[in-house]
Structure formats: C-alpha cells, structure tokens
Image (cartoon, helix red, strand yellow):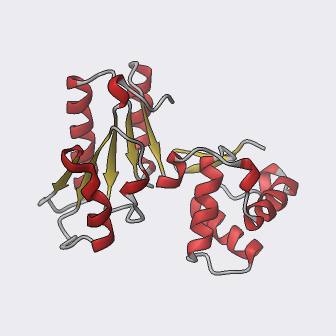
Amino acid sequence: MDTKGKNGETLLLVDYENVQSLDLRKLPEGWRVMVFVGSVQKSLPFDLVQSAQGLGDRLAYVKSDLVGPNALDFMIAFTLGQELARRPETPCIILSKDHGFDPLVKHLVEQGSRCRRVNSQLELQPAAPLETPQDLKRVLEVLGKSPKKARPRKRDTLAKHIANIVRTQAGDRKVGEIIDLLFRDSYVSEAAGKISYSF
C-alpha cells in the first residue's frame, strides 16, 4: 500500500491496549497519529510521551471509559470510518496485533480505501534484506526446509517454534522481533487467525 496521501499525510491508529512497543520519533514526516488507550490503562510511559512531543498537533490521545470485550476496537473502527468519510484519499494504518480488524480492512480496501493493519511499528519501516539478523536467517532456513503442512498455523505456535529454533523462551523479546521481521518482509501473513507462508 502507498503510505502517502495528499500532502504526504498518513493516519496511524494505535491500539495501545494491544501494542505498547512504540517510538513515535521513527514515523515519517507528515503522519498523524491517534493513540487509543483503554479504560484500565491509568498511565503512559515517559518514553512514549517524550517521543510524541515532536508530533505537536498531529498527535491525539483517545481514552475510552467503556469496559467490555472489544470496546476499544469498536472505538477505533468508528473513528477510522469518520476519518475516511472526511478524508477518503488518506492512507490509514491500524497498529494492532488483533486480526479481528482484518475483515474491516478487507472491506475498506474493496471499497477503494487505502487501509491496512500491521502487527508492529517495525512493519512500517522499509525492508532491509541485506541486514537480516542471524537468528532470522536460521528461522527462515528451518521453516523453509519444513514440509508446508508441518509449519505452525497460529501465532502462538509460531512463537514457540521460533523459540525452540533460537533456544530461548516463547515470550522473549527476541522472538517477537523475529515475528515482526517475518511480517515486515512478507515471509508470513495472517488472515482470520491463521498464518500463511510465502516461501
């Protein structure tokens, strides 16, 4: 997806309940950001607030007082619809690991909107195939040799499989970074909660 609209503007909607690893200093010039914060989140880390200062009026925090399943997700979806109604030409990106947004994104794309969901901020950075970390190379090698039917189909089983390959814990930050790189470089994709591979 082309991430530049008129005047270089792109809207990033952050599901902060779902993704807390965020450095707003790394975003391209001209992006607008809306950070959606859930009702149980009482404070934001200093590093996030500091990184956001440079955005000025291009940043908005949206706090939900609603409690319940998917309350924040519905708020994000509604706000996205409002934004596209006002500025239909603006590319919109949802930053969330929640693949429940995918049917909405698919519908919006079919209607002509430029919209997508990403799992991490790393996916917004250009791919750098010549700088592939050694652990990622090892994961690609093992997955590439595995029969297609034997490859993990769920994100949590993929995390456990990668942890075994790089000999660490499934919750290790390194595992999350490898998964983010797999998505960023389009080695894997996810639809309806199922992982598919492009190699």
Whether residue 133 sits left or right of residue 41 in the image: it is: right
Q: Say whether residue 154 is visible.
A: no
Position of residue 7 relative to residue 180, above or below, is: above
Which is nearer the eye, 195 or 183? 183
- Residue at the image point whose x is 24% and y is 70% from the top: 44
| Position of 91 relative to 69 (above/below) | above
Residue 62 locus on image (x, y percent): 18, 53
On screen, residue 128 versus residue 125, left or right, reads right
Residue 3 point in image, percent of width and height: 45, 32
Say if 134 sits above or below 70 in the image.
below
Residue 61 location, quadrant: bottom left
Residue 165 seen in the current view? yes
Q: Residue at x 39, y 40 (%)?
A: 93
- Residue 196 % position (x, y): 66, 46
Asked which quadrant contains residue 43, the reply is bottom left
* Residue closer to the observer: 97 or 123: 123
**56 vs 85: above or below:** below
